[in-house]
Amino acid sequence: MSDLVTPARGSRNAGAGGVEAIYAEVRRLAGVDVVEEAPVVTEVGPGIAAVAVRTPTLPPAAHTACYLVGTGELIAIDPGSPYPDQHDGLTAAIAARGRLVAVVLTHHHGDHAGGAAALADALGAPIWAHAETAAALPGLPVARHLEDDEVLAVGGRTVHVLHTPGHAVGHLCFRDQESAAVIAGDMVAGLGTILIDPSGGHMATYLASLERLLAARTGALLPAHGPVIEDGPAKLREYLAHRRMREARVLGALDAAPRGAAELCALAYADTPAFLWPLAERSLLAHLVKLVEDGAAVTDGSEWRRARA
Ligand SMILES: [Zn+2]
């Protein structure tokens, strides 16, 4: 009998650098040029605007949309830019619409929370986020923990809070009740892809959160990266199908003899461009965690093989 074991569910000991380190490596491989330009403001619906601020995010995206929700009084969701040159444009866009009631975070990653402290300080607004997001950012003064199913009323909008973990444990989406548009954070991307990294993400949980958004009568999806996705349900189904396809390829790459991550990655992600390989390897590990949890694979922690039927 082999000594292959099943790791504990939700094991989070890998990838100590977190997604920020992976994004930085992908930016290096992609040779990203920084273009200094003022944030662009787009009206995306009644009482909702997107301010695209430059952020250290995952290429080909180079910006994070900070969504301003409400008129007269408003919340700002994901002011992600750590760059001072982006802050003036954002505060000007907020001032043009009214008084900032709160800075709100979808999750703790640097390209979403990177400008939260600066904006909160500049405009004297509190920071609201899920408790898990607050726990991941011990240096950030989070004044209010948002919970699943809460309803926020601000500046003429009614916003339903949905806890959608998987990309990050404290991930929240915000559904505008009137239009059914969902501010989706990193659940889906209008440009590029969403990384499920086993250091803080969990594939099965992410898939369940995609299913939940589908069941929540989602209209348009307003992603953190890229343009508005008008047919939200179609995009959610596409994401679910894509992840299932990839899981099937990872399963197909497993053999009766153990294989390492590099070999499995070459087999299951042969279609992925070279600049995304650091990402592919992390995604592969997230799929392998799920396959082990499902009883379809076994591992000794460094190699994986198909479970015996
Ligand atoms: Zn993220």
Image: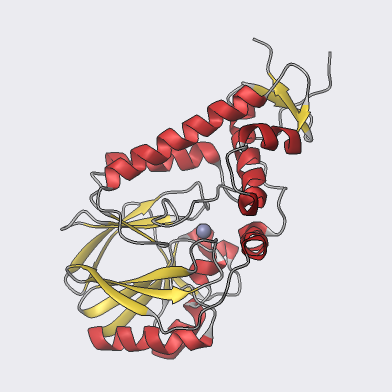
x and y, in percent, of residue 25 in the image: 68, 61
Kindly identify the residue that appears in the image at 25 percent across and 48 percent down: 231
Q: Say if residue 111 shows up in the picture.
A: yes
Of the pair 36 and 172, the residue shown nearer to us: 36
- Colouring method of the image: secondary structure
Number of numbered discs overlaid on the protein picture:
0
Q: Residue furthest top?
A: 309
In the displayed structure image, the side of residue 43 where residue 203 appears, left or right:
right
The N terminus lies in quadrant: top right
Is residue 292 depicted above or below 34 in this figure? above
x and y, in percent, of residue 217 in the image: 23, 44
x and y, in percent, of residue 135 in the image: 57, 62
Is residue 241 depicted above or below 305 in this figure? below
Is residue 306 depicted above or below 12 in this figure? above
Kindly identify the residue that appears in the image at 35 percent across and 78 percent down: 40
x and y, in percent, of residue 99 in the image: 28, 85
Q: Say if residue 124 shows up in the picture.
A: no
Q: Which corner quadrant of the image does residue 128 belong to?
A: bottom left
Q: Which corner quadrant of the image does residue 110 belong to?
A: bottom right
Of the pair 254 and 10, the residue shown nearer to us: 254
Of the pair 241 and 80, the residue shown nearer to us: 241
Kindly identify the residue that appears in the image at 59 percent across and 69 percent down: 32
Of the pair 137 and 113, the residue shown nearer to us: 113
Kindly identify the residue that appears in the image at 41 percent across and 43 percent down: 209
The C terminus lies in quadrant: top right
Is residue 123 depicted above or below 155 in this figure? below
